[in-house]
Amino acid sequence: MAKEAKKSIKGKWNLYQVSGNKIERKNKSCPKCGQGTFMAKHSNRWYCGMCHYSEFVSGK
């Protein structure tokens, strides 16, 4: 029998953070698509998978 690799639990709940009685988004929303679409955070940019919009982060 082969060993099974541990899979990380993925889901929409990982995109939110609960602090007190507030629910806050962890990632930014896409300015083109609207509030319902999250942008992915990469090492040097923010990226929207729906419309392919990118915002590059300047390195300081």
Image (tube, rainbow, N blue to C red):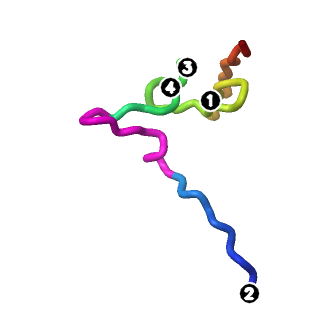
Hey, what amino acid is under mark 3?
Answer: Lys
Q: Which residue is drawn at 29% across and 33% down?
A: 22
Hey, what amino acid is under mark 1?
Answer: Cys
* Mark 1 vs 3: CB contact within 8 A: yes
What residue span does the magenta drawing correspond to? 11-22
Q: Which residue is tagged 2?
A: 1
Q: How many angstroms separate mark 3 from mark 4 (CA)?
A: 9 Å
- The image quadrant where one finds the C terminus is top right
Label 2 vs label 3, nearer the camera: 2
Location of residue 51 in the rendering, given as x and y in whole percent from the top left corner? 63, 27
Q: Which residue is tagged 4?
A: 29
The numbered disc on residue 32 is: 3
* Mark 2 vs 3: CB contact within 8 A: no
Q: How many angstroms separate mark 1 from mark 3 (CA)?
A: 9 Å
Q: Dot 4: within a 10 Å radius of its alpha carbon, few (fewer than 14), some, or many (20 or more) residues?
A: some
Q: Which residue is tagged 1?
A: 48
Location of residue 39 in the rendering, given as x and y in whole percent from the top left corner? 58, 30
Label 3 vs label 4, nearer the camera: 4
